[in-house]
Structure formats: C-alpha cells, structure tokens
Amino acid sequence: MFSSGILRLSKIPLLPCLRTLKPILHSDFVPPCYCGLPSLTKSFSQTPQSFQFNKKISRLIRSGRLSEARAVFDSMNQRTSVTWNSMISGYVQRREMAKARQLFDEMPERDIVSWNLMISGYISCRASRYIEEARKLFDQMPERDYVSWNTVISGYAKNGRMDEALQLFNSMPERNVVSWNAVITGFLFNGNVASAIEYFKKMPERDSASLNALISGLIQNGELDAAARILLQYGNNDDGKEDLVHAYNTLIAGYGQRGRVEEARCFFDQIPDYQGQKDVGIKKFKRNVVSWNSMMMSYVKVGDIVSARKLFDQMTERDTFSWNTMINGYVQISAMEEASTLFSKMPNTDAFSWNSIISGFAQIGDIKLAKDFFERMPHKNLISWNSIIAGYEKNEDYRGAVKLFSQMQLEGQKPDRHTLSSVLSICTGLVDLYLGKQVHQLVTKTVLPDVPINNSLVTMYSRCGAIIEARTVFNEMELKKDVISWNAMIGGYASHGFAAEALELFKLMKRFKVNPTYITFISVLSACAHVGLVEDGRRQFYSMINEYGIEPRVEHFASLVDIVGRHGQLQEALDLINNMPFEPDKAVWGALLGACRVHNNVELAQVAAEALIRLEPESSAPYVLLYNMYADLGLWDDAEKVRVVMERKSIKKQTGYSWVDSSNCQ
DNA sequence: GTAGGGTTAG
C-alpha cells in the first residue's frame, strides 16, 4: 500500500519573482531569464512503515544514538531517499565524512538533498581539501537548487575565499535572501565592512537574519556606531520586527563590553517593555531577559554596581544568568557580603555561581570561607579547582595549594594551562626546584606551552636559582617571547649575581626591538649595582627616563643610590634622595646606610639610620649598624648611647640579620 | 519533529 503525497519542503523559500529582483544594482548581475532553479515542490512515495522507521531513525540521531539509528537503517528492507538522507545527515553532523560518503555512494537514487548534505558536510569540516571535495560534488550535481549554491557560497565566504564566493553568487541563475546573507556574512567575516554595508543596502529584500548578520558582524569588526546607524535606519522597516530584539541586544552587549554604558542604555531604553501587550506603537518586539542581562552586565563592566542592582530589582523575570551577573558584579569592585546574600537567595545555582563565590572569597583573602564553599560545592569543575588553587597561591598558602593540586589529580580532574601556571607560581613561591621540575614535565605532557606558561617556567627556574634551565626554556621560546619573558630572564640573572649576563641580555632585548619596562630597569640597575658599574648605572637610569619615557620609581632610586653610594659618591646619593619626587622608603635609606658603612661616613650614617628608625621603629638593623660603625672608629661613648637607646626601647638584635647582610634574605 | 543553505544576542 503506497500513499503518495505532495510535500512542500518548507525550508525551501519561495523563488524571488522578477519584480523583486529588479532593484538589484550589482553590475555582474545575470538576469534570471532562462535557467531557473528546480521547483520548490517535491513528491515522493513511501509506505507507512518506512515513514515510521524514518521518524525513528531521525529521533535516535537527534538524541545522539547514532549506532542504534544505523541498526534500524540496516534492518529496513524498504528504504526511501529520506531514510538514506537521514542516516547520511547523522554521520555528517558527527563529521564522520567517510561513513557518510560510503552511504552516499551506495545510494540507489540520490536526490538534491543527498548531494546538499554531502556538500554541507564537507564544508563544515573546515579544511581546504574538504572544500575542494565539496566543490567537486557541486560541479557534478545533475541539478542544483538554492541550498546547493548557498551552501558552497557560504563555505567559500567563511574560509576567506570571497573571490570564489562572489563568482558563484554572480553566476547563480537566481538569488534569494539567503544567498545575499551568505555573501554579507562573508564580507564581515573577512573584515570588509564597506562591501557588507553596500550589499546590504542593495539587496532586493531583507529579513531579520540579514539585519542580525550585519549588526553582529559590524560589532565583531568594532564598528559599533555603524551598527547603531544601520539599526536605527533599517530596524523600523516592515520586516522581521519580532526578531529585532536580537539586534538590539547585540548592540547593547557590544557597547557594554567596550564600557560605553550610556549608548548601551540608550538602545535598552528604545526597546519597549510592555509585557503581554501586542502591537504597541510601531514596535512589536519587547525586552526579553537577555536585554536586561546585557544591560546589567554593561553596568557591572564599568563598575556601576548600583545601577546594575537597580535593574536587577526591576526585572520581573530572572534566569540563572541574571543572578550570576549580579553576584559576579559584587564579587568584582569585592562586596562579598552582598554576593553571598544573593547567592543564598538564588533559586537555582550552577557552577558559575559557586565558582564566583569561591574565587571572590579567595580574592579578598578569606581562604577559609573560599574552602568552605569549595567543599560544599556539588559538582566541582576545572574552574572551581583553578579558583581555589589560585586563591591559596595568592594568599601565599603554598603548602595548602600543593595539597589541593594533588587532591585535584587524585579526583581525576585534569589540569589545564591556568592550573599549571598557578602551580608554577606556587613552586616559585616555595623556591622548590624539585616540585618545579615535576610540574614542568606535567606541562610538557598536558598542554602546548604558550607564552604565559613559558614565562612562568622561566620565572620558576630563575627564582629557584636554576639559571641554566631558565635560559633553556627562554631560548626554546625562540621568537615567541614577550617583554615578560625578557624581564624574567634578565631578572633571574640579576638576582643571582650574573650581572654581565643580565646586561648582555638587556642589550639583546633592545636589539630585538622589545621595549623595556620599569621592571626591566629594576633588574638592569641591580645588575649594575652588583658589579659596581657606576657609569653604566647612571646612564641606564637616565636613558630609562629620557629614551623610554619611564617614570623612575622608588626601586630605581634605591638602586642608583646604592650604585653611586658604594662608589663613594655619598653626596650624590644624598642629593638623589632629597630630589626624589616621593618619600624615600627603607630600601633607599638602607642603600645609603650600607654605603656609609663601607665608606665610614658617620655623619651621613646617622641621618640614614634615623630615617630608617622612623620608618621601622622596631627594627634592630640600623641600631646595630650604627653601633658597629661607632665601635670600629673607637667612638665608644656614641656606641654606648646606641646600646642604651636599644635597651630602653627593648629592641633585640636579631641574630644573623642586618642591613649589610640582608641582600640575600628578601 | 522525516533529510539539506544564511542569521541566534547575554
């Protein structure tokens, strides 16, 4: 028993009639007079049984049970083209093109859909050899419809091959709105904003997809104001009104992400907010939860938590995203009280909510509460582990962090580059070379090392004193170094007394045209101080200011004071201190005091020591140093006075720790 | 809701 039916394939749009095509101004346009596309109706025969089986196959494929679908397919003795096509589509969706191709080749009678399925499958594979395969099939097709043309056009367009896309577009017998949309999307994908707008303006008819494509594409290209103009100009035309809220929301989010909250608000206010009312004014669309969330997010982005909360309170319908946005807002400018209050009121928490709270408490240093939430969290994910480990690291509880890291591995959670980067910082904090090397091995096994990970490795090795290993990683980075890589390596050399190497690398850095930062100069000046390069030190200090426009910080002054002071230019050192644009800190006075000790300048030493005592009244170092200087010079009365003051203020000499010896204790 | 193309916001 056969039932035959004429089924209109609803996804095939109506052919545009000649009247609507006339306004096309495109110079290469070929009038559709002789070779139209195949008809939009299709008839096929089928049994009720095959219809039921086909439905079953499609349902199984939709729920991801491909092998079960294949079993049904194999058991059928009366397959229709829909049966074959459904099965092919299942493989295509999974990108199993070899299996799809096998069925396609075995098929007794292919129809246009079979060909189109294969073509779109090859194109979705996103590799140029697959596009060629798709094109080969397209060229072999006995007849083509809009879908065939549009699939290939969009395939070329999204692979940056606009010339070929346009060639096909122009040689199509007739174009529909999807063809135009594909080309416009292609232009935007390839950054050609002007052509996208030009084609949008001259297309014969537009739908909401056209507007959405243009608006989101313009925003992705950073053309926010152009997007806004287009929306205002075309948004109120006759078509696609119900979908306009998408375009508006895209624009709100676009402005919001760039911190342009006023413009975002302006578009938010333009969307009507009448709940349940139809046809209010000229606009038929209304705000939805995404509009509200996007606007809230814009406020959160600029730190205007009050306005964000106002919106949150006004919302009649909230989803998990709304709650999370608000909680995350509080977690960020660190209002954990408000964040956890909201969290406790939330109807349905998800991983994002928990992770926000965990990282929030970790950030403000309340590691106990962070751990508390972490332990209560039902389904921890990678981000939860990363947040808590980073929290421990940030709070310098390195041992606790290591414990968590091993617990994470025991629970079968694989680390990613963020975890490993944190763990490397932990090794650096612990100065644990053994652990660091283990993590390095894990890095090699787990991720493709990127620049930040390599930087962490260089830092870890150089802080742990493994300068050779640090340099090996540094060299392996080849041309993929950033200024942090250079700083880490130069800093490593400088802090381990390899001053010549540090200065040599600094020269190399400049030769590679990498601009040094203030951190680079801290290392460079400290290297100069180490080897007593007084002329070089001065030159570097002033070239930092004059050539690189970097404002000297207190650390730079401390180094220069150290450099010139140790060289005996105590007056210059004092002048530097007096002319600093900010209050000298203990490093600066410490450097001067050290220099005074070396050059036996008691008067200046007294000045420096007094300043140090003002800054750190409980420290014994300046007293001890002054005492020793008086004693060395035989000024026993003065020495005794120092001892008495120390006793009166009950300052105890800390064993093995004094200013002159402290350079390695930092 | 039996198979294929463009657009889908936070």
Image (spheres, coloured by chain):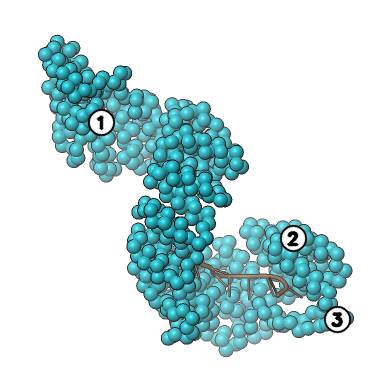
Chain colours: A cyan, B brown
Q: Which residue is mark 1?
A: A587
Residue A581 shows in this picture: yes
- Residue located at (42% from left, 30% from top): A463
Q: Chain of mark 1?
A: A
Alpha carbon separation for disc pair 3 and 1: 95 Å
Looking at numbered disc 1 in the image, what kind of residue is underneath it?
A: Ala
What residue do we see at 48% from left, 41% from top? A389
From the viewer's perspective, tell me whether residue A306 is left or right of residue A218.
left
Q: Is residue A506 left or right of residue A120?
A: left
**A545 over A303 or under it: above or below:** above
Q: Residue at x 26, y 19 (%)?
A: A653
Q: Position of residue A395 (x, y in %)?
A: 40, 39
Mark 3 element type: loop
Which mark identifies residue A2? 3
Kindly state the secondary structure of the residue where label 2 is placed: helix
Image height check: is A52 above or below A365? Answer: below
Question: In which quarter of the view is residue A167 placed?
Answer: bottom right
A439 lies above or below A255: above
* Closer to the camera in the image, A328 or A543: A328
User: Which amino acid type is shown beneath numbered disc 3?
Assistant: Phe
Q: Earlier in the sequence, mark 1 or mark 2?
A: 2
Q: Are marks 2 and 3 on the same chain?
A: yes
